[in-house]
Amino acid sequence: MSDSAYRVETTSRLAQWRIDNLASCTYRKSDPFKIGKWNWHLSVEKNRMLFVKLYPEISNLTRDNPPIASFIIRVVCSVGDRKSLTHPEITDKQLKNNDDFVWSIEVPLTGKFIIDVEFLDLKTASPDGGEPCSIWAEGFPRKRSNATALVCLGRMLTESIHTDIIINASDGSIGAHRAILAARSPVFRSMFSHNLKEKELSTVNISDMPMEACQALLSYIYGNIEHEEFMTHRLALLSAADKYDISDLKEACHDSLLEDIDAKNVLERLQNASLYQLPNLKSSCMRYLVKFGKIFDIRDDFNAFLQNADRELISEVFHEILGAWKGF
């Protein structure tokens, strides 16, 4: 049996283990695969029933900070009409060893099948005994190298201290500082350095952003954006980052959008990846749809995508599908 029989493919928060054949009485354990901070294993045991287990690899990290996992796990028959069995959603379950999650399946399974695990969240216990903390909120790119300066910049914005330019959003206005905008964006710097209307009138019109999203953009520029605010306005911030050439914001949005690709957002993410030239996001969306077979789960949405998406992007998707078929 080749090593590929034990390999688990991963992307973003999704893991898939493809099993070509399982004898009537047998046990199989996957190679380790990394999701979040931990290495994980899947195992299957077939006797009178099929037992599926998901657990973290034993390590000092697991002993000291066992994952508190929320996930959806499915077994999908990979031939014919792709029948699937889905375990009820697991929420905030601490996993320390290979007996903490066991799924007993009575339905007989033959031939090829896929074990599909979609991690919704991974948390660790709070060191001060408070609520568990999501590990995917820990990496939020908020600069803390000079906390005092950031607080002062934030106050300049929120308290309108000596503002000298007005930002007009689609449904409101807010004061800002042209020096700070110019320092963060070469596009703003060009506006204020030449005899353009923005310099003459001391206004910048951002008519394609509502006030809340515009406030989030300024909060990022001034260094005092909150994680929830960032997550709420990621796509609008990505568009603004591209428009005003704020490369660090574009990278932050890109990294964040890579982390939680799922069936509800994958087509929108794919179109944004194409629009804003984000090759890693495009590749991850393609893998999710094609290599992991999720295109079968969103047929109606995909049909609507085919009616409205850019022709070149549609062509890329079909080339990806054809390439995957050649591998079988």
Image: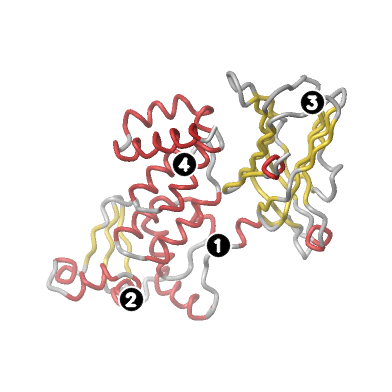
User: Which disc is residue 183 wearing?
Assistant: 2
Crowd class of label 1 (few under 14; some 14 to 19; many from 20; radius 10 Å): some
Q: Secondary structure at mark 2?
A: helix
Label 4 is placed on what type of residue? Met
Q: Earlier in the sequence, mark 2 or mark 3?
A: 3
Q: Is residue 277 above or below residue 308?
A: below
User: Which disc is residue 140 wearing?
Assistant: 1
Crowd class of label 3 (few under 14; some 14 to 19; many from 20; radius 10 Å): some
User: Which disc is residue 286 wearing?
Assistant: 4
Contact, mark 2 vs mark 3 (Cβ under 8 Å): no
4 or 2: mark nearer the eye? 4
Q: Earlier in the sequence, mark 2 or mark 1?
A: 1
The quadrant of the image that shows the N terminus is top right
Between 311 and 251, the one nearer to me in the picture: 311
Label 1 is placed on what type of residue? Phe
Q: CA distance from mark 1 to mark 4?
A: 25 Å
Q: Is residue 244 above or below residue 98?
A: below
Crowd class of label 2 (few under 14; some 14 to 19; many from 20; radius 10 Å): few
Residue 97 appears at what percent x and percent y? 85, 48
